[in-house]
Image (tube, helix red, strand yellow):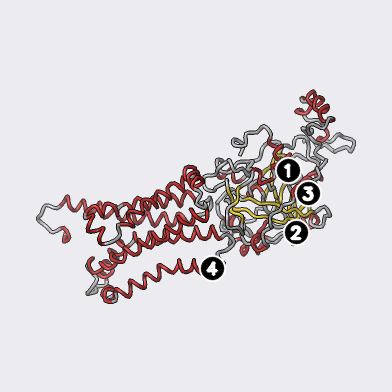
Amino acid sequence: MHLARLIKKHYQFCWYSLFVILLLPFCLLLFNFYTDSLGINPLEQLTDFTGICALNIFLFSLSITPLRHFMCRVMIFLKANYGKRLSDWNFLVKMRRMIGLFSFFYATLHVLIFFWLDQGFEWNWILEEMLEKPYLFVGASAFILLIPVAATSNNRAMRYLGKHWREIHRLVYFIGILIMLHFIWLSKPGVYDVWAYALVLTVLLCYRMHIQYAYIRQRSNDNGMELAERS
Amino acid sequence: MLIRIKDPSDIQSSEITSESVYQGRRQFIKQAGLLSAGLIASPFKTLHACEELDNANIQIQEQPNSYKEITNYNNFYEYSTDKKAVAELAKNLKTSPWSLSIEGEVDNPIVLDVDKILKRNDIEDRTYRLRCVEGWSMVIPWQGISLCNLLKLAQPSSKAKYVEFITKLDPKTFYGQRQSTMEWPYREGLRIDEAMHPLTILATGLYGKPMPNQNGAPIRLVVPWKYGFKSIKSIVTIRLTEQMPVSTWSEVSASEYGFYANVNPDVSHPRWSQRRENRIGEFKKRKTLLFNGYADQVAHLYSGMDLKKYY
């Protein structure tokens, strides 16, 4: 099993492939838009589709860390001679930036469609609706919080911000909860898709908490006599 | 048990003056004077006379939606919560034979054969706006029969204050009824004066064709000044009641879906904008009109009522 090595070797190719895959929904949207095949209610279709794309890709970016841990476990189980160390899967982390930015791209489309096509840039209306509908309020908050995260997704910002970079990017966990509230509150009774997404997000966030908890516990037990990773 | 055999010479309960009318007799005399002057309308009408609708007043300038739009975008929870899936799923509905029972506070409970209703000669064309609570709207050329014309066959009694409508319960056909989304069967209700209003119809077809299954075949209610969910589909029972019936959606969430559910841009909904609407087939949103543009015809039914309280 040399999967990790193979991807690493063809990293450029894999990166571009992923880029194309993540761009496909947008191409599909454009195609449907120009061939007038967005269905009976195009506005609803555009809004829902971009929102769902943004959410799926957002969850994909959150699953990179667990995926990396999982792949290591698999490689250890298979007794593969490469891919057993976390660092063997570092390329996943390198790809995560693009994944996250794609999520932001679809979220931006989603917001633009709402402001432009749905509300016609009538700011009075938009403000009125925001204050009246909790789902819009949390959705807008999530998007506003995503802006600094997306804006600092480059090497220069990482270098400039140092340890604060991580603090900014930890916002995504909170943003995830806001997005889920947005989705739950806008879903009408009898529609259950949202709960599948909520389950996935819960698992991903619990995994984070588990790591954090396990890591802290390990640190407190560390008396310097034994290497933590061997215990 | 006392079995009473009706004597034809008995006074029907619909002919008995109800207490509220009796108590208001002085006012009646006062108003009768005004009425003769043609100033105000009578506060009560005999239930057996159905008002004629002046068709010229409800002519819609707007272009009707296409048959394709009307029949491929349906809220019909008995099949699915997905509006685009209903047309395909509803193919299994058998609409004949179908009987419609009118019962409850009536002097003459009847069970009507819907196939016979479809052949009646008082079926009219009615092109109405339909405004869904979800923020979209259409213009639909219905064919139907004034609900009043059917109700009078059963002779509503003086106790009949409300009308309850019930959709067929048949989880074998209606896949959606197998899920506990809501308490099945679907029920809706109107106040008797709303039910007797000439705008209220039982629709039997659209675009001159028999009612498509996904639109609520074979017979459905259409109340154009209320949100679409009031216009219950595939009806089997119409029950006249003294107490206000509980409608299914207000059972699900009373704060979101009231009994009246009149289209009103000033009463907001937590999910959907009620100030504007997305007319299917149009790019820009339209302003939503009070009573869906039928205020001239129906506003008097609610005079003195706080529409924000009784939404």
Q: Which mark is residue A34?
A: 4
Which corner quadrant of the image does residue A205 belong to? bottom left
Label 4 SS: helix
- Tell me residue B79's x, y (percent): 60, 58
Could you tell me which chain the residue with mark 4 belongs to? A
Q: Amino acid at mark 2?
A: Pro
Q: Residue furthest left?
A: A225
Q: Amino acid at mark 4?
A: Tyr
Of the residues under marks 2 and 3, which one precedes in the sequence?
A: 3
Are circles 2 and 1 on residues that touch, CB within 8 Å? no
Q: CA distance from mark 2 to mark 1?
A: 25 Å
Q: Residues within 10 Å of mark 2 (few under 14, many from 20)?
A: few
Please name the residue shown 11% across and 52% down the image.
Answer: A223
Q: CA distance from mark 4 to mark 3?
A: 40 Å
- Tell me residue A124's x, y (percent): 50, 45
Are circles 4 and 3 on residues that touch, CB within 8 Å? no
Q: Which mark is residue B97?
A: 2
Q: Amino acid at mark 3?
A: Ala
Q: Is residue A51 visible in the rendered structure shown here? A: no
